[in-house]
Image: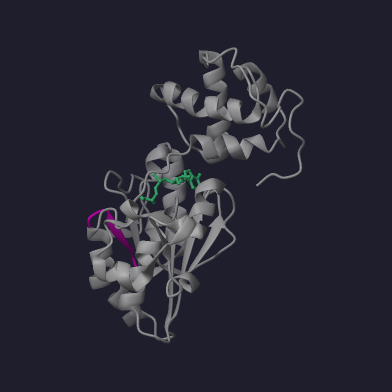
Amino acid sequence: MMTGAPVHAAARPGRPVVIEAAVLDERQYQRICELVRRRARIELGNAKRQLCQTRLLRRLKALGIPTFKQYLALLDDPHAEEHDELINAITTNVTAFFREDHHFEFLAQHVLPERMAANPDHRLRVWSAGCSSGEEPWSIAMVVREAVPEGWNTRILATDIDTHVLARAEAGVYKEEQVEPVSLARRKRFLHRGSGANAGKVRVGAELRPLVTFKELNLFEPWPMKGPFDVVFCRNVIIYFDVENKVRLLRHFHDVLAPGGTLVLGHSESLVAGVTGFTPCGRTAYRRDRG
Ligand SMILES: C[S@@+](CC[C@H](N)C(=O)[O-])C[C@H]1O[C@@H](n2cnc3c(N)ncnc32)[C@H](O)[C@@H]1O
């Protein structure tokens, strides 16, 4: 994450601004695509121009900048903090508690028992890579709490490139309707109803908190952790990357998974040609080969 760079002279954060040029032209859009590709490897493609324009107009308003031309001038400085905000604005963060619930069933019934049998040292490591606002790692944490006996050294690492969603993930506060996919028994055990200013909201409780660590991480920058992980969830993330970057990332997951560990991808994702050393073991789930 970049820090300390001054805001561009054209920017007047917090001041009301009249947007003078609300259309992102083709050349400007291509420049945004290039900046996003270079930093996050996200491929926007031609279909995302309107969406991109809408999201970046919010940045113009927040910064008090009247034109996309001035906004792009701000990004000419490679150290500008706005590069982080650009990525925050562009990422798609759709997620939900127990999204694709068959994966959590599979985790409880097959993956965790297998990994517990494989780990005589009573150590379990799970990674939610591209965790968005936290619904995925908190769902994993509920399953882990239920399936793994006391006394195990269990940790869930949850990472994302988007610092805004990561802050929400760590806060662990959700609207009641967001936790509807969580069973009543789990809500009762793991979530607490808010009151006063937090009425209508629920908060992740103390039983889950110590299990999950949140960290900002661009999957295409060096990984500070070496593993081995017993399980990696990277669901609905690789769809945004081109084939070359998918291969690079999937091979890297292979390297940090324990032999026999499991990689879980999203419903529309799969391994790609050029990635070896995995065997399918469930719906968009792959076990790292031993040896
Ligand atoms: C659609 S969400 C998926 C959330 C969750 N895994 C799920 O399936 O519900 C995709 C997430 O990937 C993150 N992401 C995209 N590119 C990334 C990158 N290069 N490094 C790390 N995270 C990235 C986005 O910020 C976003 O929060």
Residue 205 falls left or right of residue 273: right
* Region rendered in magenta: 282-291
Say how the picture is coloured.
Answer: one colour
Q: Residue furthest front?
A: 196
**Residue nearest the viewer, comparing 205 with 110:** 205
Looking at the rendered structure, the number of numbered marks drawn on it comes to 0
Query: Residue 139's x, y, as percent?
Result: 35, 63
186 relative to 119, above or below: above
151 relative to 84, above or below: below
**Residue nearest the viewer, comparing 284 with 168:** 168
Query: Residue 186's x, y, as percent?
Result: 29, 69
**Residue nearest the viewer, comparing 72 with 243:** 72
Say which residue appears at 41% left-offset and 38% top-offset.
240
**Residue nearest the viewer, comparing 189 with 262:** 189
Residue 219 falls left or right of residue 119: right
Q: Is residue 269 visible?
A: yes
35 relative to 96, above or below: above
Query: Residue 20's x, y, as percent?
Result: 60, 12
User: Is residue 290 magenta-colored?
Assistant: yes
Query: Residue 187's x, y, as percent?
Result: 31, 67
User: Is residue 244 magenta-colored?
Assistant: no
Say which residue appears at 27% left-offset and 63% top-offset.
104
Q: Is residue 162 visible?
A: no
Quadrant of the drawing holding the C terminus? bottom left
Say which residue appears at 63% left-offset and 36% top-offset.
83
